[in-house]
Image (tube, rainbow, N blue to C red):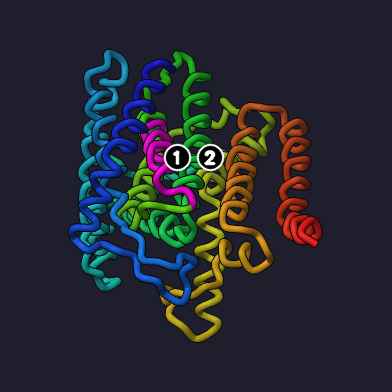
Amino acid sequence: MREYFLIFIVAAAITYLSTPLVRALAVVTGAFTPVRERDVHSTPIPRLGGVAIFLGFAAAALVARQLPFLSGVYSSGQISGILMGAAIVCLVGAVDDIHELDWMTKLAGQVLAAGVMAYKGVQLLAIPFFGTATVLPAPALVAVTVLIVLATANAVNFIDGLDGLAAGVVGIAALAFFSYSYLLSKSYFPANVFTNAAFVTAAVLGCCVGFLPHNFHPARLFMGDSGALLLGLLLASATISITGNVDPSQFTGGSVTAALLPIAVPLAVLSLPFLDMVFAVVRRTLAGQRPWHPDSKHLHHRMLEIGHGHRTAVLILYLWAALLSLGTVSFAFVEGWRAALGITVASVAAVALTVWLPRWSAARRL
């Protein structure tokens, strides 16, 4: 655990220290987010924060290579593949932050990044389905791997609409997935807690913590597409690294838990961005619009509409993200009834805060 803590500290420190420099670069290059009808900020804000996040992750990867135990994760070449994919998608996002690219070019960049990772070994080996590992033909597994990267990267991009929202939600997701991968690996015999998934999520958590002081409301810098697509790709790489390599017999909670969790946990970890993306695609399709056509009806817009302030909306969405991700992970290591009880209590509190807090605040102002 000490090596992971060091990785977290390095990623957080480099991201935090490099963000002001990246902000200056954004100002010089004219990488600003203009004020659009769907936006909630009132003045143009620099964007290019993903470059600082990439620097934090790359620094953590370089440090990990020098550590006695974590250096072993480099033996397969997958970490190098993740770094290459991260560099590609961050570069595509950075170009888009400065000179907006068309959706086809951005999609091609994401597919290229996912393809490089798959070539370096970051791909599904099997798909866990109701307690058994289903092996598909290699081209099909590569295709599923690319789809996971695309879905996760764009889900994070969809939810990046309030100051600090995407960084906080991804940080919570990284914490949940780190807990899952670390504790699961620790339960094996012999235990091996030094895994690609645990390293990536520890570094991503550090990057998010280092970036948030600059990005929380009122934000001085947005992460932009360079950050949203990068964080999505990194989380996808952790998901791919561990999904399909899970022994269901290691779970606590019975056969149903063992059968469902290998699929449920990766989905739950980013359930909030995924739900927002699915709702947006369905909503826009039903309205006769293209799925990628922007609008102002995302979950965070709904929170503002019912009366939450900017910071309050973000914090409550953090609560929902933690409830969905950490709550689902708890089923892997806690007796089912205890996990269900904790989730029920937390859900009641989350619903009460979501629905009633604006009314309480309005009543106090009267």
> On the rendered structure, is 314 left or right of 147?
right
Q: Nearer the viewer, residue 43 or 53?
A: 43
Residue at point 50%, 44% (across, down): 266
Q: Nearer the viewer, residue 206 or 142?
A: 206
Tell me residue 235's x, y (percent): 40, 44
Q: Amino acid at mark 2?
A: Pro
Q: Nearer the viewer, residue 260 or 23?
A: 23
Q: Residues within 10 Å of mark 2 (few under 14, many from 20)?
A: many
Q: Are marks 1 and 2 in contact (CB under 8 Å)?
A: yes
Q: Amino acid at mark 1?
A: Thr
Q: Which residues are magenta?
A: 202-217
Looking at the rendered structure, the secondary structure element under dot 1 is loop
Residue at point 25%, 39% (across, down): 55
**Relative to 27, does residue 320 appear above or below in the rendering?**
above
Residue at point 30%, 43% (across, down): 19
Q: Residues within 10 Å of mark 1 (few under 14, many from 20)?
A: many
**Is residue 82 among what the camera can see?**
no
Residue at point 49%, 66% (across, down): 40
Is residue 58 in the magenta section?
no
Residue 275, quarter of the rendered image:
bottom right
Q: Which residue is mark 1?
A: 243
> On the rendered structure, is 358 left or right of 52?
right
Residue 282, quarter of the rendered image:
bottom right
Q: Earlier in the sequence, mark 1 or mark 2?
A: 1
Q: Indicate which disc residue 262 carries.
A: 2
**Is residue 55 among what the camera can see?**
yes
Question: What's the magenta bit mostly, secondary-structure-wise?
Answer: helix
Tell me residue 178's x, y (percent): 47, 32
Q: CA distance from mark 1 to mark 2?
A: 6 Å
Tell me residue 299's x, y (percent): 58, 63
